[in-house]
Every structure is written in C-alpha cells, then in structure tokens.
Image: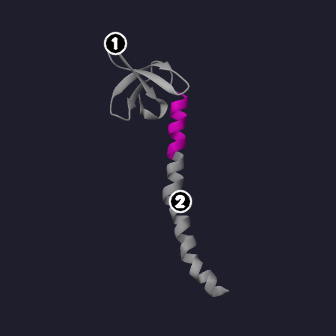
Amino acid sequence: MQQAFAQFAPLVLIMVVFYFLIMRPQQKKFKAHQAMLAELKTGDKVVLAAGFKGRVTKVGEQFFTVEIGRGVEVEVERNSIASKVD
C-alpha cells in the first residue's frame, strides 16, 4: 500500500505545483479581463490585440465599434480588446 502511495506522491505534487503556478494565475487574469470588458463604455480609450489604439464609440453584446482615427471606425469582437488605456 505504501509503495503505491510513494509512486503517486510525486505526480500529485507536480499537479499541485502546476495548478498554483500556472492555472490559478491564468484564471485570475481571465476573470480580470472579462470584468474590464464588462465595464467598458462609450468614450473609453482601448488598445486592440492588433496593436491599434482607439476610442469606443458603440458598445454591443458581442461587438464594439472603435474609432481608430478621425472618421475611421471599425467593428471589433469583444475579445480583440487587449486593455483599457487610462
């Protein structure tokens, strides 16, 4: 019985370390990004995943309209917004 436990102990330890070093921080980052997307409103300045910087002009269920230049508006998917600029 103890041999079986001794064989699986390193595997369990690796899984616990994997969870705390990789999985948990990723989940926190994902939740923070989702919260940021939920609180975006018209007029907020954002950076898109493609590197463009713009201002939100319309907020939709799945898409945002972002002005990236004077008179240049693009419609982007929610998840393509990387961050909010203060």
Whether 45 is drawn above or below 50: the answer is above
Residue 75 screen position, x and y as percent:
43, 23
Quadrant including the C terminus = top left
Residue at the image position 49 percent from the left and 59 percent from the top: 21
Percent position of residue 65, x then y? 44, 21
Most common SS among magenta residues: helix
Count residues near mark 1 (Cα–Cα under 10 Å), then give few for <14, some for 14-19, many for 20+.
few
Magenta run includes residue 17: no
Image x and y of residue 66, in percent: 41, 21
The residue that appears at 54% across and 66% down in the rendered structure is 15
Determine the secondary structure under disc 2: helix
> In the image, what residue occupies the spot 57% across and 81% down?
7
Q: Which residue is mark 2?
A: 20
- Tell me where residue 3 sits by quadrant: bottom right
- Give the residue displayed 48% in from the left and 57% down from the top: 22
The label on residue 22 is none
Between 68 and 25, the one nearer to me in the picture: 68
**Mark closest to the chain's N terminus, 1 or 2:** 2
Compared with 40, 71 (above or below) is above
- Mark 1 residue type: Gly
Label 2 CA crowd tier, 10 Å (few <14, some 14–19, many 20+) = few
Highlighted range, magenta? 29-39
Kindly check if marks 1 and 2 are in contact, taking CB atoms under 8 A apart as contact.
Answer: no
